[in-house]
Amino acid sequence: MGGSISNSRGVRQIRIPAALLALAIGGCAPASGGEDATLRLWAMGREGEVVSELIPEFERANPRIRVQVQQIPWTAAHEKLLTAYVGDATPDIAMLGNTWVPEFVALDALEPLDARVASSRDVVRADYFPGIWSTNVVDGVTYGVPWYVDTRVLFYRTDLLAKAGYDRMPATWNDWHSAMTRIKAGMSAGQYPLLIPITEWAPPVILGLQAGSTLLRDGGRYGAFSESPFRKGFEFYGRLFRDSLAPALSASEISNLYQEFERGNIAMYISGPWQIGEFTNRLPKALQDKWMTAPLPGMEGPGVSLAGGASLSLFRHSQHKREAWKLMEYLSRPDIQLRFYKLTGDLPARREAWRDSSLAGNRYARAFREQLDRVVPTPQVPEWEQIATKVMEHGERAVRGRMSNERALAALDRDVAGILEKRRWLMGRRRGEGK
Amino acid sequence: MTAARLRIPAEANSAAWFFLAPALVLIGIFFFLPVAAAMLLSLTDFDLYGIASPLNTRFVGFQNYSRLLRTPDFWLALRNTFYFAFVGGPLTISVSLAAALLLSSKLVRFKSVFRTIYFTPFVTTLVAVAIVWRYLYHTRYGFFNYALSFVGIDPIDWLGDPAWAMPAIILMAVWKSFGYNMLIFIAGLQAIPEELYDAASIDGAGPFRRFFNITLPMLSPTLVFVTVITMIGYFQLFAEPYVMTQGGPLRSTTSVVLLMYEEGFRWWRMGYAAAIAFVLFIVILLATLVQFRLQKERA
């Protein structure tokens, strides 16, 4: 991979003298119409590293546009974006984790995209997974185009499930529970059928969503956690630990997930698409045909999962919105999405890209494809991440037996009401102004 | 006499102000101004919405403070911080004093080697240390539980059990920081005249008498300094839990500074975070005053 990166750099280095030469021959002034634009694109982590490999083709097709890719580490990204906003130094385009979109909408930092999407040939809204698209819509306005998608599915040991008498992953909570109970019966002490670290908010939230909870109520003014749907999911979550089907471990206590999986200390794990590559690389050969992915079971049938991933957003202060949108369209094209998938392993947001054999033929990706038709976004409020942390904290209290479910959920709703106080005030004021 | 005394200072005064001015201006701009701004900030609900538009910020008086005092998480964080400071602090000081005495003993050879070894943890990056210690603390594969298994003690879930997480953090912090205090103690010990010990030995004082009646009293200025500096540092506990436990399990290692960091830089509730900072400032100030008072009474 490193080789191909330096390769693309080499190409660019050659192009600079060529451009100089062109200037020297043709004189200094640009020949005709429009100005040259340099776009700034911020992208995080691995995506930031490899997106520059897709840029040369775009620049060849649009000789007047240059793209500067700035790579930002995930841990610093949120702060850097906020500081950039305060300092009026936002990029033209940034990759945003889709739970961040509401936050930057609250800052009024993002450009609404509905008109551009409606007239675009490359960004076809109907071709996107609806659950994923809706993570970019705040109060009916679209602020981002999904770039890659992410959701949670089950990774499991097929041999351990088969030993318990199941040839495939059950699709309902009850069947899932009894399958795990039977796996547990064949395990020794310290081994568990399921691993869901109690420091992750996703599992209790997913189970709540599966039971039909909206998580928040009254337009995001209050939490809906002590209401019946979420309580059902939360009770099932608690049962997984109480029945010793999952250990009450925090994520930092699991030093090597792949080793535990290999030794059969755990049989199932809920995780995202990046784990496909990790499982393929890190599990020994002998185990390669003994693991599989499956969509999440639900309360009464196949269940929903979280709509995650990252989007490309256009910043309001961009000086080159037209050119920036061109780049967003280019990166959204199914063939480019597919190339991006091959570079990163990130699952494409376009359904058309999924028809390609590299994805349709990948047996581990199949569960994700199925799950992506059943994904639900988390509430579109800027406070969501903080609320999610509270869900995790109260979940941990209930799991460790410090609080009853009822009390934990009541306390959760109280905390969430406190977090949303400012939002309620702002919404009330806005309504007052409207009158 | 009085006239002379008045005249000279008048000139000296302006000269003094002239020379002091650059330092005072710098301190004013970079210290007092931000502190005053933070004080004002702590009286507002400045947050993410406030960054979007100043109109979204409300002046809330002392509501941040009153809400803070009503939040169980704050009291838990304060309790954890006290736990860390009042258990970890004395422990660090005793260990460093013991190490200093050991290295000052005439019986020990290769003193500089040991001094370097004991001092190494202090200069090592905390994040690297924390990662290694996280392995040492691992329930199943960690060294500590492996060692304990020889004495027949069942594995302890060091970082996962709310009762053990703070002791685990303290143990690491003591190991990490005792070297620095040790050096200061060694310097203090070297300043004690040898004759005192000789005289005491001739009078028939044993090693314990000599320690309590000569070493400790002669070392007391050093002890005050070390105690105050250690306690102030320990009240600001942050990096250890931030790297090792993220404040968990069940918030049992969330310190006041970690709480402040979370509120301020994770959730961007700057007003509230500023209020936490001021409360911590008052706590540290009070604790330091109490220490000075106690030392004075003893002296």
Image (cartoon, helix red, strand yellow):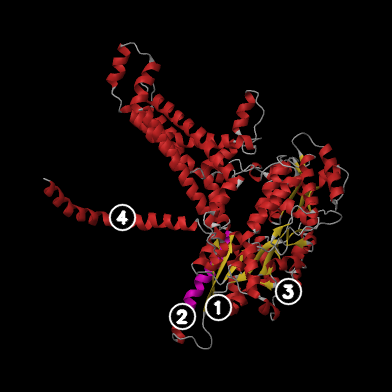
Mark nearest the camera among 4 and 3 is 4
Q: Nearer the viewer, residue A84 or B289?
A: B289
User: Is A12 one of the magenta-colored residues?
Assistant: yes
Which residue lies under the disc numbered 2? A21
Instruction: Determine the secondary structure under disc 4.
Output: helix
User: CA separation, marks 4 and 3?
Assistant: 61 Å
Q: Which residue is mark 1?
A: A320
Mark 3 / mark 1, whichever is N-terminal: 3
Question: Could you say whether the residue bearing mark 2 is in a helix, strand or loop?
Answer: helix
Residue B198: quarter of image: top left
Mark 2 and mark 3: Cα distance apart in space? 42 Å
Q: Are marks 2 and 3 in contact (CB under 8 Å)?
A: no
Task: Classify 10 Å Cα crowding around label 1: few (below 14), some (14-19), many (20 and above).
Answer: many
Instruction: Residue type at mark 2: give it.
Output: Leu
Question: What's the amino acid at mark 4?
Answer: Leu
10 Å crowding of disc 3: few (<14), some (14-19), many (20+): some
Left or right: A214 in relation to A2: right
Q: Quadrant of the N terminus of chain B?
A: top left
Residue B168 position within the rendered picture, expressed as x and y whole percent measured from the top left: 57, 35
The residue carrying mark 3 is A125
Q: Secondary structure at mark 1?
A: loop
